Image: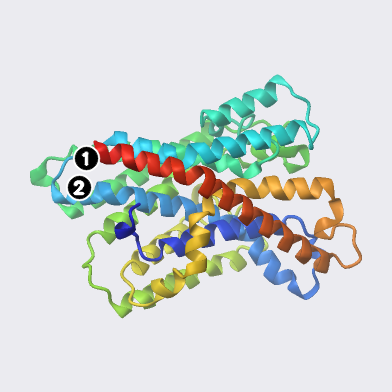
Amino acid sequence: MQQQDRVAGADFLRAAACLLVLIHHLILRVDLNRTEGLQPVLTALRFGNFGVAIFFILSGFLLALPFWRSLDAGRAMPGLRTYVLRRAARIVPGYWVALTAGFVLSITLLEHRLTPELVLRYASGLFFMSQWHWRTFFPVEGNGPLWSISFEVTSYALLPLGFLWLFAIPQGRRSALVTRLAWLGIIAVTLLTHETFRMLVPPNEIERGWQYGMQGGAKEWIPNYNPFGFFAVFALGAFAAGIQVMLPRKRRIRFDIAALACLVAAGLQLPLSAGGPWEAYGWLGIPYAFPLFPVMVAAALVALSRSVLLATVLDNALMRFTATVSFGIYIWQDIVLTSMQTISPAIFGIGEEKPLRDWFIGCTFATAIVFLLASLSYFALERAAIRWAARITRKN
């Protein structure tokens, strides 16, 4: 996205998403029963996995904006070559390096045998096809969070397919209301497909559960976790973009109030989910308190884009830097945390007399390393690919 096209509030939400996921994985490494007075707070923050839903909402919103603008202006659909090249440049280099690092970590430090199944999982991840079966759901043992990347790539593919239908509507019938209602129809079809997937592909109960490792955990998540359910979240973000382009460009204080209310409502879903499953399954079994949490985040993004002050405060220098390296934070965090815990099991306070103190020290150290690796990933690898794609697509 070019600087002049920056959406106010987007950097804050991107940074918040990656930090929530990082906090989630840090809290996984502490015994909540030994956290004394901080247990309620840490239990709520354990639902930092909701950050994954924020990523999907944000991606759907930002990627749909040029489609909505062209649609409303009566222009042709944006070129798919540019769309594909820019998405590939943004995702592929960093992801492939982190995926390969996770694979190497699996067969070295984590001491997994190099089996055909392990290679199959890695290959499925390389080609963004790991999302369709529990055997490949986690493409490598050494980097769990990479499961969501193939899910997001599926959403990248489905987004322009949905807009092909909207652009096929004759110009004389293509009003803003008709196209937005048509997109709601796409969401409805997506939810129906999600429910059909849940009914047709339930995994068996053999070694199902996290006590059986990553593949057992994948069987626990599937079929609720499937690409269609996550595209429904992504498509809500795209729908929010359609609403945003209809709004007057003038900023109003009422949008600040609406954005703050939506952010608070979304944030409250974390503590309100305590006591239930960590996945916080919502309607139709879609995780992360669907649809309330995604709708609140999407509404907050729309309101922030027209706010007078709140987006400026939230999009501060620290959050913008975090947003810049957020992809690296996401794809490298588990490698760092798993490596540290394998090398020194007590580093996060496990088995120590004062686990909370040692956990805080370990978290500080781990976070610093994650930010360093994420910065190296962006400035030494990702940025060059992004700029290359921008040059190539501008020439056409």
Q: Is residue 42 left or right of residue 94?
A: right
* Left or right, residue 317 beside residue 351: left
Pick the residue in front: 375 or 29: 375
Residue 245 percent coordinates (x, y): 25, 59
Which residue, as the protein is rendered here, is positioned at the far top?
116
What's the residue at 86%, 55% (across, down)? 346
Q: Return the mark for residue 77.
A: 1
Report how far apart the C-alphas of labels 2 and 1 lie in the structure: 6 Å
User: Who's the residue at 59% across and 46% down the image?
Assistant: 331
Q: Position of residue 57 (x, y in %)?
A: 43, 53
Query: Which element carries disc 2, helix, strand or loop?
Result: helix
Point 50% across, 48% down: residue: 284
| SS for dot 1 | loop
Q: Which colour scheme is used?
A: rainbow
The earlier-in-sequence mark between 2 and 1 is: 2
Residue 357 location, quadrant: bottom right
Residue assigned mark 2: 70
The residue under label 2 is which amino acid type? Ser
